[in-house]
Image: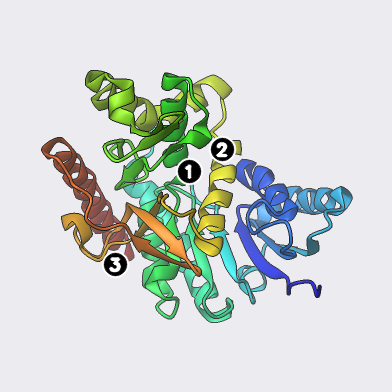
Amino acid sequence: MASKEPVRVLVTGAAGQIGYALVPMIARGVMLGADQPVILHLLDIPPAAEALNGVKMELVDAAFPLLKGVIATTDVVEACSGVNIAVMVGGFPRKEGMERKDVMSKNVSIYKAQASALEKHAAANCKVLVVANPANTNALILKEFAPSIPEKNITCLTRLDHNRALGQISERLNVQVSDVKNVIIWGNHSSTQYPDVNHATVRTPAGEKPVRELVADDAWLNGEFITTVQQRGAAIIKARKLSSALSAASSACDHIRDWVLGTPEGTWVSMGVYSDGSYNVPAGLIYSFPVTSRNGEWSIVQGLAIDEFSRKKLDLTAEELSEEKALAYSCLS
């Protein structure tokens, strides 16, 4: 059988923690499948050039059969040239004592520059995943400055939160995480996100059962479960003294794999996508919805019942995103 053409995958911030966890996963076929050759394009800032070269050396040393080339560069044009998939991990992290506006203006300038390079140099129909925070709003800025990339091709990562929610339910019920499905992360990849289990089920010997019925503790599901998922990133920083890199990298692979190769029948996942007004979420925000994917195209799952408790949560996170959007746009002027 003739082998497939290699797919070019860009990882920005590739010398950082998430990048270091992510690039071997891509090179092993975790993201695009065990039969899909890849060429990695690694971008980082000039102060990280030496570390980036070290990552390239390790990729060579690992002798990954699927890896057909590595371009490691600090030049955004070289990094973006011909890429089919772009995973935007690089960004400006919020440091102690910094105002949100300062972080936002730094990220606006980074994403403006990278969007322009993707716009001019990426392959047609390039798929983009923004990981760096504020992920939803960074994705919106990218969309603004890469007008020829279809809006459906610009997404942000809430799969990490989705996977965290699956993990919490599996631990609580003492079941395999692979038996839990159809949780939803609504809204922003921030502490206002809403992890929703109202439509989630667990595979049991007696068939699929609703999570709510099996947990049988609404106080926990409407309280501690939600805050645990919302605050999980902070809890990991406290424990590890570093942010969650392994789980972020793994969920970025999950996000792209399900988008490109399709979601399993009867299962949806959470992705930050451009809102079309579904579920009364204001159009023009990048907002996390339940989606299914076929033939490389995602679509929002329609017709799910939203109770009053959920409605308030959906609106709250949309409000935060609208404020972030306004803040980002004020940094443009």
Mark 3: few/some/many CA within 10 Å (<14, 14-19, 20+):
few
Location of residue 39 (image quadrant): bottom right
Residue underneath mark 3: 333
Q: Measured from the top left, where is residue 124 in percent x and y?
A: 54, 80
Q: Position of residue 296 (x, y in %)?
A: 50, 68
Residue mark closest to the camera, 3 vs 1: 1
Q: Amino acid at mark 3?
A: Ser
> Can I make out residue 313 in this image?
yes
The residue under label 2 is 247
Q: Secondary structure at mark 1?
A: loop
Q: Is residue 216 above or below residue 231?
A: above
- Residue 93 marker: 1
Q: CA distance from mark 2 to mark 1?
A: 18 Å
Q: At 27% from the left edge and 57% from the top edge, which residue is drawn?
A: 325
As drawn, the label of residue 46 is none
Percent across and percent down for residue 71 are: 75, 65
Front-most of residues 83 and 333: 83
Mark closer to the chain start, 2 or 3: 2
Label 2 is placed on what type of residue? Ser
Quarter of the image for the C terminus: give it: bottom left
Q: Could you say whether the residue bearing mark 2 is in a helix, strand or loop?
A: helix
Query: Would you call the spot at circle 2 few (<14 residues within 10 Å), some (14-19), or many (20 or more)?
Result: some
In space, the residues marked 3 and 1 are separated at their CA atoms by 22 Å
Placement of 82 over or under 129, stated as above or below: below
